[in-house]
Image (cartoon, helix red, strand yellow):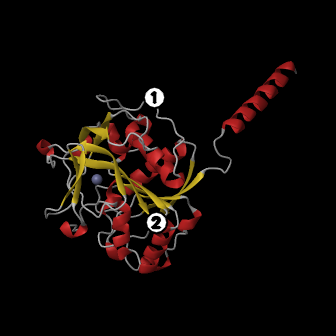
């Protein structure tokens, strides 16, 4: 009996400690994760959605509902997700302009205007080039016929945000190799406490993105190397924006499971999603965060891609 009593006392102590240190009593943050379509087979949302869901739920802060949109125009007339039931909508989704009916677009605009959070992951900034409100939410995007009509190129040159009006198609990337990410805003809750520069796991480095860039702050950039098809500029990688009362976190990182296994991707995605939902970040920077010259990734995440068994170098040839 004394042993059981001790265990009971310890259990009560643990419960008390857990409840008294919990930052919020309101339960997990409700997240809607939208997938269902991409620009091509190279963006395997069927593989990456479970990764994004796991990364958010592993933090203990979020409860994620996956909503898969039909991938054919006309089928979305009955597709009416209730955005307002969620604090933040994560888009692992890339569809053409005519896919969403006008009332669905209006419902999403109202949700964000009224304070709903949005997270744009990688190719979600390819979606909907002709939807003006969406362009304002993402700030900058690429592909799907975007040209100078979409807005200027945005990049950082000599430490200064530069808007480049020269004509040309939007969107490019080189081969997937590890690259250095530089934090440009050390005061923002998402990037506060991160190393000034850190090595990202092999990923597409998006370059030559264009758009209105309204109410956009560039939190981090990466140098797009001309030797790897790059622009020669420091390209925006992590951005925050506002649209009405809504907060948007946009990460250009995360082409595939391998890229999403980077501890730098995971931590900024978790922090960015919390910020988009609440305006604050309560999560600590993990001790395993990559350093200025060393990548760091979670093997348990990378293994969620069947190609992982072939080794990291096989991934680029799987393109
Ligand atoms: Zn990609």
**Mark 1 or mark 2: which comes first in sequence?**
2
Question: x, y percentage for residue 115?
Answer: 52, 63
Q: Circle 1 — which element?
A: loop
- Residue drawn at x 68%, y 47% as measured from the top left: 25
In front here: 47 or 285? 285
Label 2 sits on a secondary structure element that is loop
Residue 140 vs 187, above or below: the answer is below
Q: Are marks 1 and 2 in contact (CB under 8 Å)?
A: no
Q: Nearer the viewer, mark 1 or mark 2?
A: 2
Q: Quadrant of the N terminus?
A: top right
Q: Residue 244, which numbered label?
A: 2
Q: Which mark is residue 106?
A: none
Q: Which residue is mark 1?
A: 287
Mark 2 Cα shell of 10 Å, populated few (<14), some (14-19), many (≥20): some
Q: Is residue 307 left or right of residue 62?
A: left
Judge whether residue 15 can be spotted in this image: yes
39 vs 25: above or below: below
Taking the spot 48% from the left edge, 68% from the top edge, the residue there is 113
Residue farthest right in this picture: 1
Q: Can the viewer see residue 319?
A: no
Among all residues in the image, which is located at the extreme left?
Answer: 227
At 74% from the left and 35% from the top, the residue drawn is: 15
Q: Position of residue 299 (x, y in %)?
A: 40, 35
The picture places residue 318, in percent across and down from the top left corner, at: 25, 48
């Amino acid at each position: 009996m004394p042993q059981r009593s001790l265990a009971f006392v310890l259990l009560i102590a643990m419960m008390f400690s857990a409840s008294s240190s919990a930052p919020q009593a309101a339960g997990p943050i409700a997240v809607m994760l939208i997938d269902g379509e991409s620009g091509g087979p190279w963006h395997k949302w069927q593989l990456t959605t479970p990764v994004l869901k796991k990364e958010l739920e592993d933090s203990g802060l979020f409860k994620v509902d996956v909503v898969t949109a039909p991938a054919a125009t006309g089928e979305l007339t009955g597709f009416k997700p209730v955005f307002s039931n969620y604090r933040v909508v994560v888009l692992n989704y890339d569809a053409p302009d005519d896919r969403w009916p006008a009332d669905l677009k209006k419902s999403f605009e109202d949700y964000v205007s009224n304070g709903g959070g949005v997270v744009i992951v990688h190719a979600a900034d390819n979606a909907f080039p002709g939807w003006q409100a969406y362009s304002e939410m993402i700030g900058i995007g690429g592909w799907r016929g975007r040209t100078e009509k979409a807005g200027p190129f945005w990049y950082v040159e000599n430490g200064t945000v530069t808007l480049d009006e020269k004509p040309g198609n939007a969107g490019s990337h080189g081969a997937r190799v590890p690259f250095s990410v530089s934090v440009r805003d050390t005061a923002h809750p998402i990037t506060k406490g991160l190393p000034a520069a850190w090595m990202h796991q092999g990923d597409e480095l998006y370059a030559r993105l264009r758009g209105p860039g309204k109410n956009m702050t560039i939190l981090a950039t990466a140098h797009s190397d001309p030797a790897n098809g790059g622009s020669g500029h420091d390209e925006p990688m992590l951005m925050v924006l506002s649209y009405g009362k809504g907060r948007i976190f946009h990460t250009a990182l995360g082409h595939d499971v391998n890229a999403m296994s980077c501890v730098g991707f995971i931590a900024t995605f978790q922090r960015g999603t919390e910020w988009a939902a609440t305006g604050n970040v309560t999560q600590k920077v993990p001790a395993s965060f990559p350093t200025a010259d060393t990548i760091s990734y979670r093997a348990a995440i990378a293994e969620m891609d069947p190609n992982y068994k072939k080794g990291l170098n096989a991934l680029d040839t799987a393109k």
